[in-house]
Amino acid sequence: MKFENILEEIDGFGPFQIVIIVLLCAPRIVLPCHYLLNNFIAALPPHRCDISPLDDGGLFRNLTSSRD
């Protein structure tokens, strides 16, 4: 008995088979994204914090430590 004959006996490819196919294919779509994630989060680019706005009270000039 061939697979096509079995499908004909059980009324063909129905909604249950479609749901099973979707559930089996969904991880195949998401898994490559998971593997590529390491390429983006593993690298540490060179950086330097720019603190020039803090000089001479630039950005925080209105902040004081006194409580009025």
Image: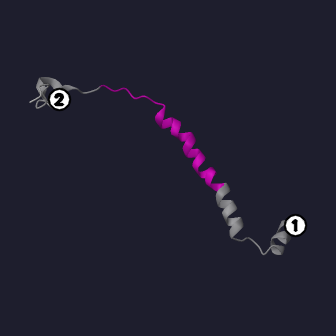
x, y percent for residue 58 = 13, 29
Examine the image and state in which quarter residue 48 appears: top left
Is residue 27 rendered to the left or right of residue 59? Answer: right
Q: Is residue 42 magenta?
A: yes
Dominant SS in magenta: helix
Crowding around mark 2 (Cα neighbors within 10 Å: few <14, some 14 to 19, many 20+) is few
Residue range of the region highlighted in magenta in the rendering: 25-48
Crowding around mark 1 (Cα neighbors within 10 Å: few <14, some 14 to 19, many 20+) is few
The residue depicted at 52 percent of the width and 36 percent of the height is 38
Nearer to the camera, 42 or 15: 15
Q: Nearer the viewer, mark 1 or mark 2?
A: 2
Q: Is residue 41 magenta?
A: yes
Q: Given the image, on which type of amino acid does mark 1 rest?
A: Lys
x, y percent for residue 60 = 15, 30
Q: SS class of the residue under badge 1?
A: loop
Which quadrant: the N terminus?
bottom right
Is residue 2 rendered to the left or right of residue 24? Answer: right
Which quadrant: the C terminus?
top left
The residue depicted at 84 percent of the width and 74 percent of the height is 9
Q: In the rendered structure, which disc, 1 or 2, sits on the residue that comes first in sequence?
A: 1
x, y percent for residue 24 = 67, 55
Is residue 10 rendered to the left or right of residue 23? Answer: right
Examine the image and state in which quarter residue 49 appears: top left
Q: Given the image, on which type of amino acid does mark 2 rest?
A: Pro
Nearer to the camera, 13 or 47: 13
Coloured how?
one colour
Residue bearing the label numbered 2: 53
In this view, which residue lies farthest toward the left?
A: 68
Tag of residue 2: 1
